[in-house]
Image: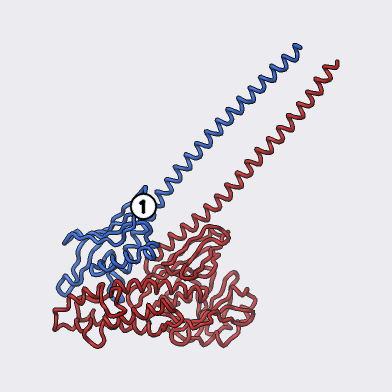
Chain colours: A blue, B red
Amino acid sequence: MKSKKKMNRKGQMQMTETIAILFIFFILLMFGVIFYFRYQKAAFQEKEEELLGQRAMESTLKALFMPELICSRGEAEPEDNCFDVLKLNSSSETMQHYLDDYYFEIFSYATITVEEVYPENKTWILYDKPKPDFTRKEPTFFVVTLRDELAGKNQPHYGLGYVAVTVYS
Amino acid sequence: MAYGKISGRRGQLELTFNWVYVLIAGTVILLFFISLVARQKQVSEERLSGDVVEVMSSILAGAGVSEKTKNFIDASGLADYTLYFSCQDGVGEFGIKDRPARTQNSIDPLFAPREVHSPQIVTWSLPYSMPFKVIDFLMVIPANVKYYLVGNDADFVNEFVNATEGIKRTYVPNLQQIEPEANLQVRLIDTDGSVIPHSQVPVQLQSFDDTEVSAVVFTGINQVDFYQKQGSSWQKLNQKLLRIVSLPGEKNAAKYGAIFSADDQIYRCNMGKALNRLEKLMEVYGGKDIASGLIGGKLQKLSEHYQGDISSDCRGYLEQNNENTVGALSRLSSNVAACRLQPQSCSELDLIEAAEKLKQMNDKLRVSCSASLY
């Protein structure tokens, strides 16, 4: 009788021991999972920021070399970092008109504006497609010359401005 | 004694049970970790191929905007992978063969072989103008392809050899002088259509796999044909007439595009992308109704400016003379629209002629006036 009781107690103790081990095991597992997911989330956010920065640079680069905007010189190489003022108005119209079915593939969710700072203060909104409910945006600016062939006397007049490209995610 | 026996048997049973339990639990844990490792391997491979496509996209985007530059990309790290390129219905696609990572693009024309498995890739960007700058064409040239020039167009042979430094190419007076190298694919460029259509595949290339030997033939007026080796003879790939839509001149992007395209389908599809962009640019220069003669865009600004200047030649070159810029742009616009809407009935020669006319008018504006169209 005594021996049976002793064995029951031993069994109960073993059972408690097993439950305690399992409990600690699951706690540790939970810590591991939480840590892993926190790390993954941070890494994902970091990657997202990196990609957004990269996209901002690529979009600016694409805008600077767009045939719709650049200062062409016949068959010669176009002028560097220069936008043709006479093309800006119609480019804005064309880009907004074909925004969803063409230019969206080039710039995705972004806003591109050209701001003239000298001799006047003018703004051209070339492309405007902000992401609905965006969580992050990355603006980049690039100084450009603005060529107006009709403003000067027998030679084009150059103004100064900047192109602002904002990308959203 | 009886109790001792029972207790012993129970102990034995417990011991066996413990071992079985440990074995099952161990196997389950082991399987869990094996599946975890397998899953991680799959995820990291997918991530790697995604990264490769992403890096390639960035390289191609960068190369696409830096005019007339050649980039030599070391792809030895991708030795285990085969890149594939395709273009259908105006949408180009590239990625890693048999992997889920891929990217699609309906904007940038990319002239490439169907598959690239090479330790080095050359990307070369050339501006396409019609007559104003339309877009940059990007050529993807694997280092394991050798280009042999044949035919009698000496000017083009010289131009090509000078322009393609760093790419394996050589001129051979006839097909018998081709000396194929091991592990190199072969593309023949017949500069005037005098060699390939009238000959068999050279004997020294007949042992090559059919997919490794191809030819591009320039013939007629701005005409191009694509050929593929089929045993000892050539098989023409394009069933319909295919013309190079470009203006004459050095480094003709559309002609180079044909040289570096796998076949007529990739070529046609990418030229379609360029025509699409040309249509948009036409609106920037002439407004959306320019095809029907109603001016807008930059042309309207020029017209308004020269309106009051009665004595000026500029007004005449713009819209008063028999041959004027408005008319030339309008004709080009209607030709482009026709080619975009009905490629079967498109007259590429009319389109080229209209672009040539616009170029002449713009040259006159450049010489005589303070402003020109482009």
Asked whether, in this view, residue B301 is left or right of residue A53, the answer is: left
Q: How crowded is mark 1: few (under 14 residues within 10 Å), some or many (20 or more)?
A: few
Instruction: Name the residue beneath numbered marker 1.
Output: A132
Q: Position of residue A162 (x, y in %)?
A: 25, 59
Residue type at numbered disc 1: Pro
Q: Where is residue B350 in the image (x, y as percent from the top left)?
A: 38, 85
Farthest residue in the top direction? Answer: A2
Residue B25 visible in image: yes
Task: Name the residue: 49% across, 40% down.
Answer: A37
Task: Name the residue: 47% across, 40% down.
Answer: A39
Q: Nearer the viewer, residue A143 or B152?
A: A143
Q: Is residue B311 above or below residue A68?
A: below
Residue B190 visible in image: no
Q: Is residue A94 above or below residue A29?
A: below
Asked whether, in this view, residue A124 is left or right of residue B187, the answer is: left
Q: In this view, does B218 lie above or below A50?
A: below
Q: Which of A73 and B87 is in front in this view?
A: B87
Q: In this view, does A89 lie above or below B345?
A: above
Q: Position of residue B116 (x, y in %)?
A: 54, 66
Number of marks in the rendered image: 1
Task: Name the residue: 78% across, 27% down.
Answer: B13
Q: Give the quarter of the figure containing the N terminus of chain A.
A: top right
Q: Where is residue A22 in the image (x, y as percent from the top left)?
A: 61, 28
- Residue at disc 1, secondary structure: loop
Task: Name the residue: 43% across, 74% down.
Answer: B271
Q: Quadrant of residue B283?
A: bottom left
